[in-house]
Amino acid sequence: MPSDAARLVQGLRDAHDRLFSFAAGMDAGDLERPSYCDGWTIAQVLSHIGSAAEIGRATLRAALGGQEPLDQAGRQAIWDRWDAKSPAAQVADAGASDDELVEALEGLEQEQLDSLEVPFGGRQLSAAELLRLFLAERALHTWDVEVVFEPSVRLRPAHVDLLLDALGTLVPWYAEATGYAGPDRVAVHTLEPGRDFVLLLNEGVSLLPSGPAGDGVARLELPAEALIRLVYGRLDTEHTPSEVESDGVGLDELRRLFPGR
């Protein structure tokens, strides 16, 4: 049976193929359209994926012992080079860059993947932890692009399955408690797939696995893909599915808690 890391590599291949197959049908005018990602055109979103893939390849080579890790100046040089490309080149080069990253990951033996440790943000991440960050970035940015053309689009179920149970590791990175005035404990039940979590606010913000909520607790029920979009600041009123229900906590409060980055 494939490990979590191997399944995530498969998810990355699927995310890559979906995004760049979709992009292949765009014309020059489409590439200049604003994406959902505030301040970025569709071409700039794809360029971000391309530069992130280049940085990801360098990170992978460093973890495998092939080179020194990139420093901030090295990352900035990559971003500057991608920013200087034309929209058409950003899109074409992004597809090639991201494909090269996925191919490099596909070329690793499962034992290499499972034993890999990667320095990231002051922490040592396992391959599965790093790959979830890669997959989440591609899944959410794919939504940023697709939603421009189809407002009811949702995250791909296969990606939701790979991201949902580890969502709690990302919540402290994306939550902003300043200005939040809601309850400090919210029971969260997801649909498709069904899971129970508890959102806690004390010294920080955390999302933990939980049993079904008891009476008198603030509750939130929503599709699992909507919970992921909420954490990433992408559950505005125009893109909130009808299945979302809340009691004792307002969606506007939760949107302030997760403003997006």
Image (spheres, grey):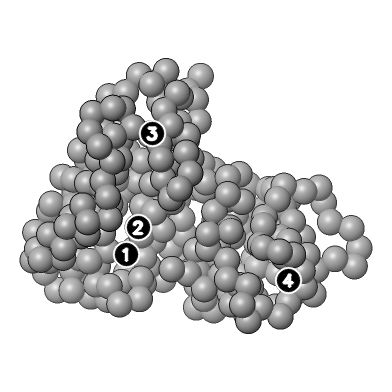
Categorize mark 2 by other alpha carbons within 10 Å: few (<14), some (14-19), many (20+).
many
In the image, is 259 to the left or to the right of 201?
left
| Residue located beneath label 1 in the image | 145
Q: Amino acid at mark 3?
A: Gln
Determine the CA span between mark 1 and mark 4. Answer: 28 Å
Do the residues under discs 2 and 1 have CB atoms within 8 angstroms? Answer: yes
Categorize mark 3 by other alpha carbons within 10 Å: few (<14), some (14-19), many (20+).
some
Q: Amino acid at mark 4?
A: Ser
Q: Is residue 10 above or below residue 212?
A: above
Do the residues under discs 1 and 4 have CB atoms within 8 angstroms? Answer: no
Quarter holding residue 47: bottom left
Determine the CA span between mark 2 and mark 1. Answer: 5 Å
Q: Position of residue 56 (x, y in %)?
A: 29, 43
Of the numbered discs 4 and 2, the one sitting upstream in the chain is 2
The numbered mark at residue 142 is 2
Q: Position of residue 108 (x, y in %)?
A: 32, 23
The numbered mark at residue 10 is 3
Determine the CA span between mark 3 and mark 1. Answer: 21 Å
| Residue located beneath label 4 in the image | 246
